[in-house]
Image (spheres, rainbow, N blue to C red):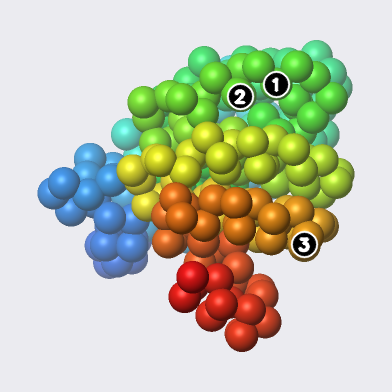
Amino acid sequence: MRVKTVSKNLLSCADPAYAEKTKHYFKTGPGEYAEHDQFLGIRVPELRALVKQHRDSLTPEDCCELLQSEWHEFRLFALLCLVDHFQRGSTTQQKSVISCYFKYKKHINNWDLVDASAYKIAGAWYFDKDRGRLHKMINARSLWERRIPVIATFHYIRKNDLDDTFRYAEALLGDKEDLTHKATGWMLREAGKRDTPRLKTFLRKHLDTMPRTMLRYAIEKFPEQERKSFLNK
């Protein structure tokens, strides 16, 4: 009944015209990375407002059910709600959230879904724990599964723990997906804000093999002349 109520509320917010625009933004055309994704056209602020409205009535298990929906916004709502449960919950509740997150990770299948949840759930959970599970995901076949541990390091970076960011970046130098390059470059840039010399050392070491997209994202905040110097080497 709880899930049905939330589903009804989500469907009532659908905006077909906005959904069409969203499809183009998230690359749902033939052969694109989100070819089979379905959109209702619900804006993120509306989803966040609905999370606040329903978070006290939904359980992590309810969110698991919503996370399996064909609708992109249902999945994003479920992840935003899981983040809320994790951040406000006890250790027992956090265990339920992390269990759901990994059990249904195949439904976390677009960049915004990963980016809204990975560092707030997986990153926060594994910060002071064995990260073997995330390390293995760097070699996953799924683009989205590889993106999760990369974005998870955003939580570590904020705690001045940069090792896994550089470790994953090195492992993904040969990755074929542009979205992986973007995510990795973004995290390198964030790590560089904490330790610029270490970032520059990493870039110089791997400049010949680093994908250009990863490099451009990593040096985005460098002074213009220094940026040009790295790009022209």
- Residue 63 is situated, as x and y percent measured from the top left of the image, at 56, 27
Left or right? Give the position of 217 relative to 165: left
For label 2, count other residues whose C-alpha is less than 10 Å away and answer few (under 14), some (14-19) or many (20+).
many
Residue displayed at 80% across by 14% down: 92
Mark 1 and mark 3 in contact? Answer it, CB < 8 Å.
Answer: no
- Residue 24 is situated, as x and y percent measured from the top left of the image, at 27, 62
Dot 1 falls on a residue whose secondary structure is loop
Amino acid at dot 3? Thr
Dot 3 falls on a residue whose secondary structure is helix
Mark 2 and mark 1 in contact? Answer it, CB < 8 Å.
Answer: yes
- Give the labeled residue for mark 3: 196
Q: Earlier in the sequence, mark 1 or mark 3?
A: 1
Q: Which mark is residue 134?
A: 2
Q: Mark 3 and mark 2: span between their CA atoms?
A: 25 Å
Q: Mark 1 and mark 3: span between their CA atoms?
A: 25 Å
Amino acid at dot 1? Arg
- Give the labeled residue for mark 1: 131
Amino acid at dot 2? Leu
Residue displayed at 66% across by 75% down: 222
Dot 2 falls on a residue whose secondary structure is helix
Left or right? Give the position of 9 relative to 92: left
For label 3, count other residues whose C-alpha is less than 10 Å away and answer few (under 14), some (14-19) or many (20+).
some
Q: Mark 2 and mark 1: span between their CA atoms?
A: 5 Å
